[in-house]
């Protein structure tokens, strides 16, 4: 719980004023409801260095009656302990923009998550921008897959999209280990 909870709290605290973050290019999304189900994190945010990265990260989006989603993230910490975090993902009028509310949250703010590319059946790439303690933008992202692996060509394409087009910093974005996982 430590690592996922820490990431959720860092996201919530750092995102109190996202107005200064750039909006990335996105692709048309026809039906964001298709995000429902289990996803495996192929790459994602890093804030604590590579040696402390969780592995076997999953994200489960469960539809709610109001059209939003409950989010449950599970991971294995470097010491082998299981970790989880929960949140609420709200749909917006913009099909490419989701609002993530973390729990527990120390603020009432939300995290803007922009869908930059997805087919909902196989892959999803999203851009996340937070403001650090000096109010400077920290741009990161996430690549999710319906399987715990991804074709190297698709991974390279989505990584290039996030880094070179959306502006994700390689300082805050890293591949996620999905080997030898027990989900």
Image: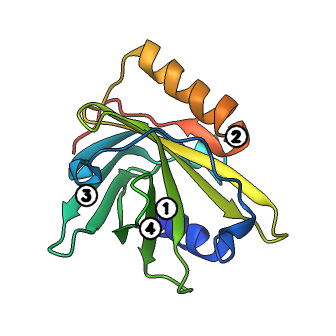
Question: First in sequence: mark 3 or mark 4?
Answer: 3
Where is residue 158 shown, x and y percent of the image?
A: 50, 27
Q: Is residue 128 above or below residue 144?
A: below
Q: Is residue 38 left or right of residue 172?
A: left
**Residue closer to the observer: 123 or 43:** 123
Q: Is residue 125 above or below residue 66?
A: above
State how the image is colored.
rainbow
Q: Dot 4 corresponds to which residue?
A: 100
Question: First in sequence: mark 3 or mark 1?
Answer: 1
Q: Secondary structure at mark 3?
A: strand
Question: First in sequence: mark 1 or mark 4?
Answer: 1
In the image, which is nearer the foreground, mark 1 or mark 4? Answer: 4
User: Residue visible at 28% across and 37% down?
Assistant: 181
Q: Residues within 10 Å of mark 3 (few under 14, many from 20)?
A: many
Question: First in sequence: mark 3 or mark 2?
Answer: 3
- Give the distance between the C-alpha atoms of the residues marked 3 and 2, in whole angstroms: 26 Å
Q: Quadrant of the N terminus?
A: bottom left
Q: Quadrant of residue 99?
A: bottom left
The numbered disc on residue 3 is: 1
- Give the distance between the C-alpha atoms of the residues marked 2 and 1, in whole angstroms: 25 Å
Q: Quadrant of residue 117?
A: top left
- Give the distance between the C-alpha atoms of the residues marked 3 and 1, in whole angstroms: 19 Å
- Give the distance between the C-alpha atoms of the residues marked 4 and 2, in whole angstroms: 20 Å
Q: Dot 3 corresponds to which residue?
A: 61
Q: Secondary structure at mark 2?
A: loop
Given the current orientation, which residue lies at the most extreme left position? 65
Q: Residues within 10 Å of mark 2 (few under 14, many from 20)?
A: many
Question: First in sequence: mark 2 or mark 1?
Answer: 1
Q: Dot 2 corresponds to which residue?
A: 167
Where is residue 31 shown, x and y percent of the image?
A: 26, 49
């Amino acid at each position: 719980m430590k690592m996922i909870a820490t990431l959720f709290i860092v996201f919530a605290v750092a995102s109190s004023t996202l107005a200064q973050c750039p909006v990335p290019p996105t692709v048309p999304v026809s039906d964001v409801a298709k995000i429902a189900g289990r996803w495996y994190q192929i790459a994602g945010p890093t804030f604590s260095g590579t040696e402390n990265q969780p592995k076997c990260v999953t994200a489960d989006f469960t539809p709610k009656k109001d059209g939003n989603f409950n989010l449950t993230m599970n991971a294995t910490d470097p010491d082998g302990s299981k970790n989880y975090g929960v949140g609420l993902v709200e749909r917006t009028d913009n099909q490419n923009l989701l609002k993530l509310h973390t729990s527990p949250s120390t603020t009432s703010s939300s995290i803007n998550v922009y869908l930059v590319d997805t087919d909902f059946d196989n892959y999803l790439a999203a851009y996340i921008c937070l403001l650090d303690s000096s109010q400077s933008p920290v741009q990161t992202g996430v690549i999710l897959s319906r399987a715990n692996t991804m074709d190297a060509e698709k991974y390279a394409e989505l990584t290039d999209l996030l880094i070179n087009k959306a502006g994700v910093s390689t300082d805050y974005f890293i591949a996620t280990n999905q080997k030898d996982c027990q989900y």
